Image (cartoon, helix red, strand yellow):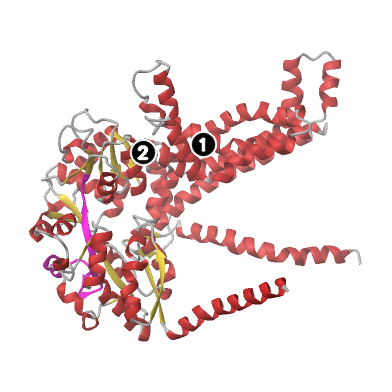
Amino acid sequence: MRGLPGQIGTWLAMPVVAALVALCLAPLLILLAYSFFQVDFVAISRDPTFANYVKIAGSETYRGLIARAFGSALLVVAITAVIGYPVAWFIAKRVTGAKSTLLTLLLVPLYSGDLVRIFAWRVLLGAEGAINRTLMWLGLTTEPLAGLLFSPLATHIALTYNYLPFMVIGLWLAFESLDDAWLEAAADLGAPAADRFRRVTLPLTSPGLIAGGLMVFVMVAGDYLTPQLLGGASGITIISAVNDLFGTAFDWPLGSAIAWTMLAILMLCFGAGALAIRRTALVSEGV
Amino acid sequence: MYRRDLLRTALAGAALGALGPASRAYAATDILWMTWENLAKDDYLAPFFAANDVALTKTFIGTDDEQFAKLRAGGASSVDLITPGLDKVEFYTASDLLQPIDFDKVPNAALLYDTFKKTPLGKVDGETYGIPFYWGINPIVYRADLMDEEPDWSVFFEGDKYNGKLAMRDYALEGIMIAAMYLGIPESEMFDLDDAQLAEVKKVLMIQKSKLRTYWNSIGDLTNLFATGEVVCAFSWVPPYYDLRAKGIDMGMAKPKEGVIGWCDTIAVPKGVEGERLDATFKLVDYLLGPDYGKMLAVGGPYAQSTSAARDMLSAEEQEKIFISDLSIMDSFVWKKNPPRYNEWVALWNEVKAS
């Protein structure tokens, strides 16, 4: 009798598991298989080889683009963390009545869609955009600053704006579960504010920081529309290179190998993140 | 009573709505055309539907590559007509995805311009698999009010007057063709570049990159960049020239003497289409090469059909607009072809962009 609810739960979960396997795992495994094939014009040779992975390792372009994707993701994680930390603290610890309103407002830009937000940034950062016009009106510049738009700066401003809510949500959850009694105890024991932050607040909110950071990291590493439309001549990303390989060049095997290289690195990052969350959870439990 | 009447009316309406398409679907032969949105406008096709009991489903493509990827991945069985570029038909025939065109069922094909009759592209062993459909050029489009003189390809490689004000299409094939034309590489060698020539091309493309504002991916986006003055000159498609002139901006269109890239899209029938569907498909193909469609495409596009069917129905100005007033101009175009080492071209293009 005790096992019956558990069995029902297992059976009920089966369609979800089947859907996950069919829609998520199977395509990834097919992609993995393709990554060991070779292409000859439009024919795919299915003799397994590591040639594509060797090509990626030997190509300065692909290595550089992969490094650039993760470097860019790390930078945006750092910026969103610095901005998101006080915002999340404020919503969790200082706002009482309008908490849900503030959180909803935070998410409003996400309802507008990627392209709308990207073009809104173009309007702001362009040669005839609001920022350049204001700077010229104030007499701070004599001609529009070309570097504001179609530059890595524009790309990173938009990426930060796009993904900041995901960092704030992760941090807000961590701050909500932070018991203020820990901070009061630390203060009673004479710990100065900086120490209270470093030894109590930061460790206890780090699971939120890591979870939010991983979300932002993955989304920035996989975003190619923002760099393409705001990054100018340097807007190429490893994802747009994969797009070229799958589309224009019909080199599905090399495209698959790059996709799996990215996936493997992301899985390593996730593994490290999960380990870090587990360690901080053990520390906070006093183990 | 009011509520009951309303429900009755709604139910009757729903029943009629459901019956309408169903009865039509049973009466007509359904065919599916995978094409560009601007080619399948309802008014362009209205005369065809008025004369034939055919129902058409349209699937729009964003790029030629996307179309090939869909068919190559197994989508050919559900599609009756596709619209590949003349240079890309080889991809489909090598993948055994197409059936030859039955010219007995396409009488308007007799009116194909000589350039398209003679082209070896789209053919295998004398059989035509992709029949030229419509064509045009990809010129340099520029803001005449912001440039001192008509540019040629050198504007993308020399001088610094327009640095940071230029745009190039993000497409390896055309990007490398332009570099080759600038370097004076003849058309006979252009699609079969050796290592030394590719190295030269890469060198000038790196110079070009330093002068660009951006690489463009959508023609709507490029039109916006022209309108806002972010870009003053670009390797472009024709539409921004007409669209922005209509809005009062002084635009120019340059056809460099070193060569202008000509493009042509074909219509092709996937393997496996047969019976009534095949007959209906060839009827549509014949209509697409005929005078009614050709006139509407010339006026509405403005694009030129590959046949002369509508030529005499167009005014001199309309002919000029689609480059058919003097047909000898076609001989000066460099028609796009598929390079045998295209994967290396794409890799080179990405190397330049990532540099």
Q: Kindly identify the residue that appears in the image at 63 percent across and 60 percent down.
A: A20
Classify mark 2: helix, strand or loop: helix
Residue B298 sits in which quadrant?
Answer: bottom left
Quadrant (top left, top right, bottom left, bottom right) of the C terminus of chain A: top right
Which residues make up the magenta segment? B114-140
The residue under label 1 is which amino acid type? Leu
Which is closer to the viewer, label 1 or label 2?
A: 1
Q: Is residue A62 left or right of residue B307?
A: right
Residue under circle 1? A159
Q: Is residue B263 visible?
A: no
Q: Nearer the viewer, residue B339 or A184?
A: A184
The residue under label 2 is which amino acid type? Ala
Provide the chain ID for the residue under circle 1: A
Q: Is residue A9 above or below residue A99?
A: below
Residue B226 sits in which quadrant?
Answer: top left
Q: Kindly identify the residue that appears in the image at 24 percent across and 82 percent down.
A: B105
Residue under circle 2? B354
Characterize the local packing of mark 2: few (<14), some (14-19) or many (20 or more) Cα atoms within 10 angstroms.
many
Provide the chain ID for the residue under circle 2: B
Q: Nearer the viewer, residue A135 or B352?
A: A135
Characterize the local packing of mark 1: few (<14), some (14-19) or many (20 or more) Cα atoms within 10 angstroms.
many
Q: Kindly identify the residue that appears in the image at 39 percent across and 67 percent down.
A: B72
Classify mark 1: helix, strand or loop: helix
